[in-house]
Amino acid sequence: MAEFWDVVRLTLVVTGLALAISAALGIPLGVLLARSRFFGRGLVVAALYTGMGFPPVVIGLVVYLLLSRSGPLGFLGWLFTPSSMIVAQIVICLPVVAGLTMAAAEAVDPELALQLRSLGATPAQEARALLREVQPGVLAALLAGFGAIISEVGAAMLVGGNIDGQTRVLSTAVVLETRRGNFGLALALGGALLTLAFVVNALFLRFQVAPRRMG
Amino acid sequence: MTMESVYRIRALRKTYGRSWSLTIDALDIRRGETLAVVGPTGSGKSTLLRLLHFLEPADAGTLEFEDHSVAFPVPVELRRRITMVFQRPLLLRGSVLDNIRIGLRLRGQHEAGREAEILKSLGIGHLAHEKAFPLSGGEAQRVAVARALAIGSPVLLLDEPTAHLDPAHILVIERIIRSLREDSGTTIVIVTHNLLQARRLADRVALLLEGQLIEEAETARFFDHPADPRTAAFLRGDLVW
């Protein structure tokens, strides 16, 4: 039982950190891409959209090669640790968060900023109000990013190694128990994964229906 | 600048793209008056309002507002003396009441004011707690007007404020505009395609054609004895652009 909770805890830590870092980088990147026009923007956007559909197992392979002992980042010693899993999940999650945030920010009427200025908003108030308008789209982006990494197996298996007590998360544990023929346990772990995803999604949506009032 | 002028415009120019520009050689807007700006689509009426609200800088010339020579970045305190109702009523997420209160909240005033009374006067009191997004065009337009009225700025810029409204509600808005001028001394600049509305509301009327200020005059003189043949042609309904 203690092992089970260790797996759940590690799943939450790895996914939570990867999502938080992806959000910290991806939300500003998405807003910036939506609001700016520069040479090569189309290429950046195309790369972002490609990243949204990139196979996680290939991302895992690339991260594996980068972090392996002979790889350029091998000196970090992160391979087969939770750190490598977080890195791989960021690479999977970041394009999803940035791409969907960009789409949400582009959907906000550009005249709304002028409207807010007209109503007496300072630049800081204007930015906060615009972010509030984008909030549902950003939450959807975070949910999609979370969904992409919570259940991901290929990259987690490749760079984490599914080591008992160290890098085993719910998705890799399901694969392991299925291979062992412990279908009951595999189903229970799958159920736990679904429950976890449901609870986190419900919490996100709770934020969406209770927007903060502007001050 | 005379004491009674709120705005003083001299040789103002705003250019878009390579060819189109708004040019106003001289225009004074007096405190407490209602100035109607008329002209065909694309003549620069909305651009003029954006310049008067300091939402974008002019490329040349001078714009003075209440003894201040306007230079960018414009202090937010100066911009807050003016409120504008845009041609397209853009509302924010939240309830109608949230939208009405936003201007006051941005100014740090959180206590309830005259919002309920304003909503009622516009015939949308029953929508106060409804979400702002499923509103019809006419309702959204009235919410946008109410949002501006709640702030109570001394200068009000209105860009086609009755464009989406039925005749009864047009008269309601016009009555409110008249009472603002008469009771509060609000300076009002209204852009309208409706010449009858301009005649009903304005102390003076200005005509813009292709970015040029053709004529501005007292309302009766503008309509009955226009000085410029292009004004006369515009009032006849001829294609003068």
Image: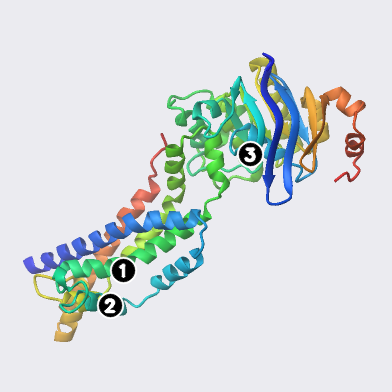
- Residue B32 sits in which quadrant? top right
Report the residue marked by disc 2.
Answer: A62
Q: Chain of mark 3?
A: B
Q: Chain of mark 1?
A: A
Q: Chain of mark 2?
A: A
Sequence-wise, the earlier of marks 2 and 1 is 2
Q: Which mark is residue A91?
A: 1
Separation (CA) of disc 2 from disc 1: 10 Å
- Amino acid carrying mark 2 in the image: Val
Q: Which mark is residue A158?
A: none
Observer able to see residue B98: yes
Q: Which mark is residue B86?
A: 3
- Residue B206 sits in which quadrant? top right
Tag 2–tag 3 contact (CB < 8 Å) = no
- Could you say where residue B162 lies in the image, as x and y percent from the top left? 71, 37
- Amino acid carrying mark 3 in the image: Phe
Marks 2 and 1 share the same chain: yes
Q: How many marks?
A: 3
Separation (CA) of disc 2 from disc 3: 52 Å
Q: Which is more foreground, mark 2 or mark 3?
A: 2
Observer able to see residue B161: no
Depicted A169 relative to depicted A182: above or below: above
Q: Which is more foreground, mark 3 or mark 1?
A: 1
- Amino acid carrying mark 1 in the image: Val
